[in-house]
Amino acid sequence: MLLVEADGKSLLARHGIRVPAAALVRQAEGFCPEGPGPWVVKAQVPVGGRGKAGGIAFCRDAEAVTEALRRLLGGTLRGHPVTMCLVEQAVAGAEEHYLSLLVDPVSYGVRIAWTRAGGIEVEKAGEIASRLAPPEEGAILVAAEELLAEAPPRDRVALREATVSLVRALLRDGLLLAEVNPLFLGPDGAVAGDAKVVLDLNLAETRADLRDLVLARPDAYPDAVRKLEEGFDYVEIDPEGEVGLVTTGAGLSMVVVDEMQAAGLKPLNFCDLRTGQLRGDPARLVRVLGWIAERPQVRVVLVNIFAGITDLGEFGRLLSDALDRTGLRLPVVARLVGNGAAAGRAELERRHPAVAVVDSLPEALTRIAALRAS
């Protein structure tokens, strides 16, 4: 999961990466930036491309900071609500570099990349030099030394120090990506102007400090918080999605999302319900249906369950119970395939005859398209 910049920088800073003086702000009124300006105001949303989307403002005085906060807070950026902004002192008189470490699972290694052309136009600077190393601190540092041999001699000490800190952050906090762009190099060394940090959420389930970092920001990481607190996956993939999904199995759920998008439908979410963990309690289904119902643009719900060990007869009863509890007013299309499918279908037809029970995914998509248009 991608962290907001403030959290990414906090992780990197505890391993030695220097960051500008900054404050995390949730309301414009009453805030006054400390220290000398200018300042940079940055919307804190877990998405890239904030600068090009208008989510970053350079402010020469405190009045401009207030105006930027008023413009950004309470709005949305690339589909994410802006509930907080980072206000930090601008770094002046420094060169911009790019430095990153990326876990490369295909090669079972870590790729380190560096270039002198940092900033939002780094992609246009040409091919970024990189090296691949085994996922061990010593090996990564050796690869980094080879890479940084191309850097100007005056920059090498600061780049080496930043690389050592970045390697430690990646390996000790189990990061999947640690990217600093721009990495400012000035008379006092290296400073992280921005940080893109991708955390392994599976590790956060076992590390109390990382878990607490995620849980502290439910507004920034709602999907991750749901996974940590609920024990299953529910990820909103399109805030404007019109079809809520109640599905199980990560791979099968991804297929459903792909097929829907290919048919011109807009799924709201990915869902791996993990039906094997329901066992007589509809609470999980109640929560999923509740999250879907919170989105006013959703027009229909698709329930697609392919069961092996799961008894779909029991699932039909639990789904019926959940529909009773939530009082869901959205139309529902249900496809139940596998163990006990006939019993599950009979249960839904008896208790909720308005649910359209179908046999195939193409039929389900046809029904959804018709309901969406009605």
Image (cartoon, rainbow, N blue to C red):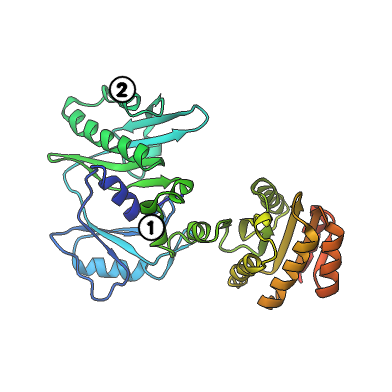
CA gap, disc 1 and disc 2: 34 Å
Residue toward you, 203 or 355: 203
Q: Residues within 10 Å of mark 2 (few under 14, many from 20)?
A: few
| Residue depicted at x 13% and y 41% | 188
Residue type indicated by callout 1:
Asp
Q: Quadrant of the C terminus?
A: bottom right
Q: Secondary structure at mark 1?
A: helix
The x, y position of residue 109, in whole percent, is: 44, 28
Q: Residues within 10 Å of mark 1 (few under 14, many from 20)?
A: few
Question: Where on the picture, by quarter, is residue 368?
Answer: bottom right
Residue type indicated by callout 2:
Val
The x, y position of residue 309, in whole percent, is: 75, 50
Q: How many marks?
A: 2
Is residue 4 at all visible to an observer of this figure? yes
Residue toward you, 298 or 245: 245
Q: Left or right: 154 with respect to 328?
A: left
The x, y position of residue 226, in whole percent, is: 52, 61
Task: Judge depth for marks 1 and 2 and give the one in front.
Answer: 1
User: Which residue bears the numbered disc 1?
Assistant: 212
Q: Which mark is residue 142?
A: 2
Residue toward you, 2 or 63: 2
